[in-house]
Structures are given as C-alpha cells and as structure tokens.
C-alpha cells in the first residue's frame, strides 16, 4: 500500500534541532516501509495558520509502501507514536509550534471522513509546504480525489517567500 506523509517541525526536540528531528523521523518512517521509501529534501517554510510569532518550519515529504494488512487508523497510531517519541504535545490551541508533526496525506486510494482521521488530508492540495517536497519526490503524484498532479496543484498556489531548500537530495531506501 502506497502512503504519503508530510513531516514538519518548528521546535527543537530532545533529539536535536528541527532539521535533525525531521531527518530522524524520516529514518523512523523508513523502518516502517516494506520495499521503498522516498523522502524529499528538507525545506524551510513559512508557518501557515499559526500564531504571528511562530518560528519557521522544516518540512519534508515521504512516499513509501506499507503492509496491505495495515489499516489507516492503525498506521495513524504508528505516526502518532513517533510524534510522541520526539516530544509532540497537543495543546488546545490549534497550530501551535511543535517538535514533530506527521500528517498522513494519503493511504493508497482510501477515502475516510472521520473525527480522528480524514483521507486524503483535507488541506494538502492547498499547502505549498506539502506540495513542494512532494513534487520533488513525485511530480506526477495524484492526491486521491484530484485530477491534477502535485506539480499542477502547486502551480496554482502563491509562492512562499521564505521557502528554501536546506538539503538538496532525495533519501531512498
């Protein structure tokens, strides 16, 4: 089953800086994959829908395969366990700074609309911090429910003046 995960951090964790935390999270995800795991470079991006004083984010995207026996809720639980390992807290105020955020963008072609999980991610197509690294990994990737590729969706968005690539290579398993 092919899954796509967006990774973000704008606070250091006990394991290191935001850059180090995202890189380590990529390694954690790699261990969950069956045969392939492609990860984008790391990007510095503007905070979106965050308080005005929020620090910039470090973002990446991972596209990988997982066991067909996993269901989306179980996989989300695995992602949340990784977040907790890196000190993720979930305060009442939304979009606060965080040590690690792993968003499940897609889980094959599965579509879910629940309180705990919505697939595909309902705002992925509106976020340059998701689409830019996704285009690096797979410009032709299609988010379930959309006719346009990731590259086409990105072209529809305004540019992020803070967006810059930090690591110019793709991790591969």
Image (cartoon, rainbow, N blue to C red):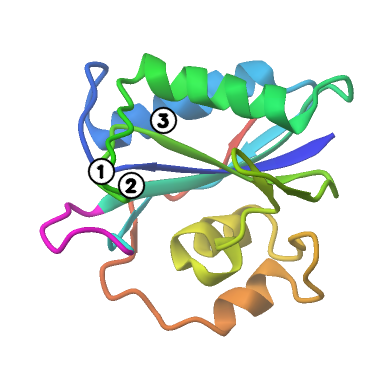
Tell me where residue 70 sits by quadrant. Answer: top right
Q: Is residue 59 visible?
A: yes
Q: Which span of residues is magenta-colored?
A: 49-56
Quick one: SS at disc 1?
loop
- Whether the residues at callouts 2 and 1 have beta carbons within 8 Å, the answer is yes
Taking the magenta stretch, the answer to whether it contains residue 167 is no
Label 2 secondary element: strand
Residue at the (83%, 46%) spot, across then down: 110
Whether label 3 touches label 2, CB < 8 Å: no
| 24 or 106: nearer the viewer | 106
Quick one: label 3 or label 1, which is nearer the N terminus?
A: 1
Q: Residue 37, image x and y in percent?
A: 68, 32
Q: Is residue 34 above or below residue 107?
A: above
From the viewer's perspective, tell me whether residue 134 is left or right of residue 101.
Answer: right
Numbered badge on residue 58: 2
Numbered disc in front, either 2 or 1: 1
The residue where tag 1 is placed is 10
- Report, in whole angstroms, how far the alpha carbon at label 3 lies from the one at label 2: 10 Å
Q: Position of residue 169 (x, y in %)?
A: 50, 46
Q: Is residue 113 left or right of residue 42?
A: right
Magenta stretch, main secondary structure, is: loop
x and y, in percent, of residue 75 in the image? 68, 25
Q: Going 30% across and 28% down the picture, which residue do you hit?
A: 89
Q: Residue at x 40, y 48 (%)?
A: 59
Image point (44%, 50%), residue name: 168
- Look at mark 3 in the image and give the residue it sits on: 23
Q: CA distance from mark 3 to mark 1?
A: 13 Å
């Amino acid at each position: 089953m092919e899954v796509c995960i967006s990774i973000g951090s704008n606070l250091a964790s006990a394991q290191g800086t935001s850059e180090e935390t995202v890189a380590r999270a990529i390694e954690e995800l790699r261990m969950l994959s069956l045969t392939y795991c492609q990860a984008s470079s790391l990007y510095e991006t503007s905070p979106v829908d965050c308080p005005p004083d929020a620090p910039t984010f470090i973002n990446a995207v991972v596209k990988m395969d997982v066991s067909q026996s996993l269901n989306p809720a179980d996989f989300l639980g695995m992602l949340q366990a990784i977040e907790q390992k890196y000190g993720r807290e979930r305060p009442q105020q939304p979009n606060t700074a965080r040590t690690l955020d792993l968003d499940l963008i897609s889980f094959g072609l599965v579509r879910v609309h629940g309180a705990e999980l919505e697939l595909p991610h309902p705002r992925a197509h509106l976020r340059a911090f998701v689409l830019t690294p996704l285009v690096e990994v797979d410009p032709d990737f299609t988010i379930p429910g959309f006719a346009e590729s990731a590259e086409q969706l990105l072209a529809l968005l305004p540019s992020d003046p803070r967006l810059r690539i930090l690591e110019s290579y793709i991790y591969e398993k």
